[in-house]
Image (cartoon, rainbow, N blue to C red):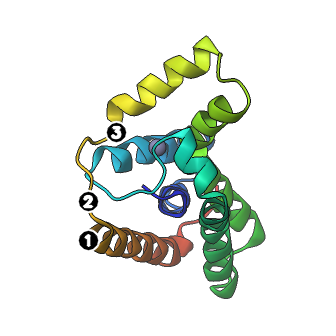
Amino acid sequence: MILATHFIVGASVASLTASPELLVFTPLVSHFVLDSLPHWEYIDSLADLKKNKITVTLDLLIGPLLIFAFTYSNAIPNTKIAWILFGGLMGVLPDGIVFIEYFLFPKSIFLKKFESFHRFFHSEKKLKIGVGLPLQVLIIFLAILIIIVAKTVEMR
Ligand SMILES: [Zn+2]
């Protein structure tokens, strides 16, 4: 999955809960559920990551920017926007941990274990960009729709 999809779906599930435990847990679960579906992606190794630095940067920025634009323009209170953005961060965190392993601690046993755990959930089936990208755009659209509809959920 692209990072923006993970961020926005994480943000979306976070918008449905007022529980701090679920705020951390459900976006993490959403990451592994999304990865377990057949999907298109452009990063599968350190080499891909190095080759696609600009795309990765844009991919990282799209999620927070879209979430901020849609929550702010829908008069969602700032505390809830922060809550939702945190959910997005948790949604993308598993890939972030793998990137940290690749770039900073390639010898870390703990991070290697985490990478295998992450790979375990990852679908073996890859979709072509022509199918996979529109599908992720659709997922992003639905996830944003959920945030806007769920804005009436009170923060407790
Ligand atoms: Zn992942």
Within 10 Å of disc 1 (Cα), the crowding (few <14, some 14-19, many 20+) is few
Given the image, on which type of amino acid does mark 3 rest? His
Q: With 21 as the anchor, is 122 left or right in this view?
A: left
Proximity of marks 1 and 2: CB atoms separated by less than 8 Å: yes
* Residue 74 picture location, percent across and down: 62, 85
* Residue 26 picture location, percent across and down: 48, 44
Q: Which residue is mark 2?
A: 127
Q: Residue furthest right?
A: 78
Q: Residue at x 30, y 43 (%)?
A: 36
Within 10 Å of disc 3 (Cα), the crowding (few <14, some 14-19, many 20+) is some
Q: Closest to the observer: 131 or 52?
A: 52
Q: Which residue is mark 1?
A: 131
Given the image, on which type of amino acid does mark 1 rest? Val
The label on residue 122 is 3
Q: For residue 79, say whether it is visible.
A: yes
Distance of label 3 from label 2 (alpha carbons):
13 Å
Q: Nearer the viewer, mark 3 or mark 2?
A: 2
Helix, strand or loop at label 2? It is: loop
56 lies above or below 71: above
* Residue 61 picture location, percent across and down: 67, 67
Q: Residue at x 45, y 57 (%)?
A: 42
Q: Is mark 3 within 8 Å of ligand 1?
A: yes
Helix, strand or loop at label 3? It is: loop
121 lies above or below 64: above
* Residue 58 picture location, percent across and down: 65, 68
